[in-house]
Image (cartoon, rainbow, N blue to C red):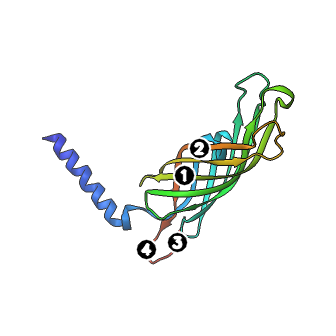
Amino acid sequence: MCCKTVIGLLLGLAGVAAAQEPGGFAGERLVTVTAGVGNAMGWFGAQGERYFLDERISIFAGVGYTPRLDRGEPVGPTFAAGFRSFTSGAKHRLFVETSASQLLTTSEGAVSGGRYYGPGFQFGYQFVSRGGFTLMTSLGLGYALGVPRTLDPWATQVGLGLGYTWRRKYMTGGRRTL
């Protein structure tokens, strides 16, 4: 009996909270910070993203670390930057991304230890919960610049990140605040 009362009370409070904001969300997305793996996060790293134009466009920057997995591979900090265009949606959104990031590393032969950056294009998915939890996944293709003729400059791009999204709060009377 006590368990049913507690569950009913929690569900009732959740309904009241959701009714206070249109769609149950406190405001539009402002900033997202994610950590994970992928080209846009500097391989193993994190990225910050800022939204514009009613959350439909964003710019991001990522910083990460390239670990040495094989003998002769380069190791060290890695960087990325780009922009995204999103579909509409409160929780679930698709996006297209254009970025510049590290695409290839080399560990064999005369080009051992090379790191190659270039432009890339990805398609992705973003989930943002009511509480701010964020999941991002992406997949695409990039072209590494300056690659020796013996190597294929085309590289697969991937991304998987978990993080948090802050929303802009709205006050009554139509004034915006952070």
Label 4: few (<14), some or many (≥20) within 10 Å? few
Res 42 quadrant in image? top right
Res 150 quadrant in image? top right
**Above or below — where is 74 with respect to 126?**
above
- Mark positioned earlier in the residue sequence (1 or 3): 1
- Residue 44 in view here: yes
Q: Relative to the observer, which residue lies in front, 113 or 172?
A: 113
Circle 1 is placed at which residue position?
A: 124
Amino acid type of disc 2? Gly
Secondary structure beneath disc 2? strand
Circle 3 is placed at which residue position?
A: 176
Circle 4 is placed at which residue position?
A: 172
Are dots 2 and 1 in contact, CB under 8 Å? yes
User: What is the x, y in percent for residue 127?
Assistant: 47, 52
Q: Relative to the observer, which residue lies in front, 122 or 74?
A: 122
Residue at left offset 65%, top offset 48%: 141
- Mark positioned earlier in the residue sequence (2 or 3): 2
Residue at left offset 76%, top offset 31%: 75
- Point out the frontmost of discs 2 and 3: 2
- Point out the frontmost of discs 1 and 3: 1
Circle 2 is placed at which residue position?
A: 159
Secondary structure beneath disc 3? strand
Q: Residue furthest right?
A: 110
User: Cα distance, mark 2 to mark 3?
Assistant: 33 Å
Secondary structure beneath disc 1? strand
Residue at left offset 45%, top offset 78%: 173
Amino acid type of disc 4? Thr
26 on left or right of 7: right
Q: Residue furthest top?
A: 71
Q: Relative to the observer, which residue lies in front, 130 or 4?
A: 130
User: Cα distance, mark 4 to mark 1?
Assistant: 35 Å
